Each structure stands twice: as structure tokens, then as C-alpha cells.
Image (spheres, helix red, strand yellow):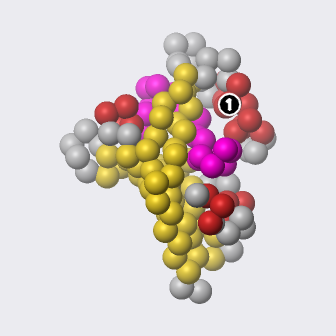
Amino acid sequence: MLHTIDPEILENTIATLATTGSDGGPEMTAIWYLVEEDRILISATARRRKTKNLAIHPHCSVLVFHPSSVNYYAEIRGVAELIEDPAYEISDRIAVRYDADFRTFDGPNDRRLIIAVTPERVLITDVR
């Protein structure tokens, strides 16, 4: 389903993840991500609000703007699966895109997870 998105949009390295908070309201956060096997992959720790939200309400939305136009973007609505990533196997693949190492962000008691968003609907807006 992600093949319907202009590949240039997915070149933007920053996206926005919207989840449902504990009060039922929306919560959004900027994310780093990778597209792999028709899913959006996001690395996060278990203590983060987004992972807690998704454990309760797995439906979410990812918004990615075209790198050169705020008038052209894709909204990916889907369901998130939380996957344990203790060896940073998937996190390392995401981190390469950002020249980063998630291990440097984590405390000794942090649990690294992958948020794997499987798209159910893709909406493209182009008002350039």
C-alpha cells in the first residue's frame, strides 16, 4: 500500500506519529522512521508515551510531508504492532538513516521496541 506514495515524500526523514492518549485525545510526536516490507518502522523505548498509547489503542496515523512542499503530503492510517528489539537489530537499520545509535539515548533499564505500522489506508494531499 505504501507503493502508492510518491517516493520523494518518503525521503523526508522526519514524520509525525499520532496516537490516542489515555484520555482519548490525540497525541502527536515527531519521529524518525524507515519504510520496510510495506510498513513504517519506528524505534522507541517502552517508557515513551507513544508506546504506552499504542499498547492500549494500536490504531495510529503517520503524516509525512514532501521534503520541499508543505502542500504535498501523505497520511498513513494503520495499526501498530509493538515488537521487542533487545539486540537493536531493527533499531540499527533505522538509525543508519540518521547517522545515530539508539544505544546512546537509552538508559540501563530501557527496553527498546519497534513500532511497526501496517497501513490500512493512505491519503495523499497535493494542493501545490
- Measuring from the top left, give residue 60's x and y in whole percent: 41, 49
Residue 7 lies left or right of residue 14; in this view the side is right
Task: Identify whether 109 is placed above or below 64.
Answer: above
Give the magenta part as a residue range.
33-52
Instruction: Report the residue at 59% width, 86% height from top.
Output: 128
- Taking the view exactly as shown, the residue that stands out farthest to the left is 23
Q: Which residue is drawn at the image coordinates 62% and 66% (left, top)?
A: 4
For the point 70% across and 39% down, the residue is 94
| Quarter assignment of residue 99 | top right
**Quarter occupied by residue 51:** top left
Q: Position of residue 6 (x, y in %)?
A: 67, 69
Residue drawn at the location 25% of the way across and 39% of the way down: 22
Residue type pointed to by label 1:
Ile
Please, which residue is most extreme toward the top here? 108
What is the secondary structure assignment of the residue under circle 1? helix
Depth order, front residue of 3/94: 3
Q: Is residue 95 left or right of residue 14?
A: right
Q: Is residue 59 above or below residue 128?
A: above
Tell me residue 31's x, y (percent). 56, 47
Q: Residues within 10 Å of mark 1 (few under 14, many from 20)?
A: some
Residue 106: give x, y in percent of width and height. Answer: 59, 23
Left/right placement of residue 102 relative to residue 76 reads: right
Residue 26 magenta-drawn? no
Q: Which residue is mark 1?
A: 90
Quadrant, the N terminus: bottom right
Whether residue 67 can be seen here:
no
Give the answer, above or below, for where 123 lies relative to 32. Answer: below
In this rendering, the answer to whether 19 lies above or below 46 is below
User: Do we see residue 73 in this rendering?
Assistant: yes
